[in-house]
Image (cartoon, rainbow, N blue to C red):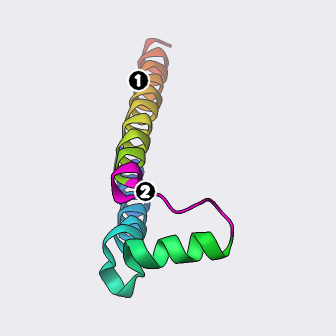
Amino acid sequence: MRISRLATRLLIGGLFVGHGAQKLAGAFDGPGIEGTEKMTDAHLVYEGRDLRKQVTDAIASAAAQARLMRRVKEDAERQDALKKLE
């Protein structure tokens, strides 16, 4: 069970890292910052923001994700401990 959770997290995390690298750095033939700004402006998703704001948002999102995953892990550990007591 734990190995499947780890594999799932690594897979999904890798997809997110790859996607972010495309959008921010232009890796894997991605558009990079300039192309991403043009796409979002064209689609009226949001007005173009500078790189510093995007990186700050990415770090804040990663921190929130880490806090959430820590809570999920703690809850799973509590449930495992309760099952062992039964």
- Give the main secondary structure, helix, strand or loop, of the magenta stretch: loop
Q: Residues within 10 Å of mark 1 (few under 14, many from 20)?
A: few
Looking at marks 2 and 1 on the same chain, the residue that comes earlier in the sequence is marked by 2
- Do we see residue 1 in this rendering? no
Asked if residue 1 is among those painted magenta in the image, a careful observer would answer: no
Q: Secondary structure at mark 2?
A: helix
Residue 30 lies, in percent from the top left, at 40, 82
- Do we see residue 19 in this rendering? yes
Residue 34 lies, in percent from the top left, at 41, 75
Quarter of image, res 22: bottom left
Which residues are drawn in magenta?
44-54
Q: Secondary structure at mark 1?
A: helix
Quarter of image, res 54: bottom left
Q: Which residue position is annotated with label 1?
A: 74
Quarter of image, res 8: bottom left
Considering every residue shown, the one lying at the far top of the view is 85
In this picture, residue 65 sits left or right of residue 21: right
Above-or-below relation of 56 to 34: above
In this picture, residue 24 sits left or right of residue 49: left
Above-or-below relation of 34 to 56: below
Q: Which residue position is annotated with label 2?
A: 8
User: Label 2 is placed on what type of residue?
Assistant: Thr
Residue 44 lies, in percent from the top left, at 69, 67
Q: Residues within 10 Å of mark 2 (few under 14, many from 20)?
A: few
Query: In the depicted view, which residue is nearer to us: 56 or 76?
Result: 56
User: Label 1 is placed on what type of residue?
Assistant: Glu
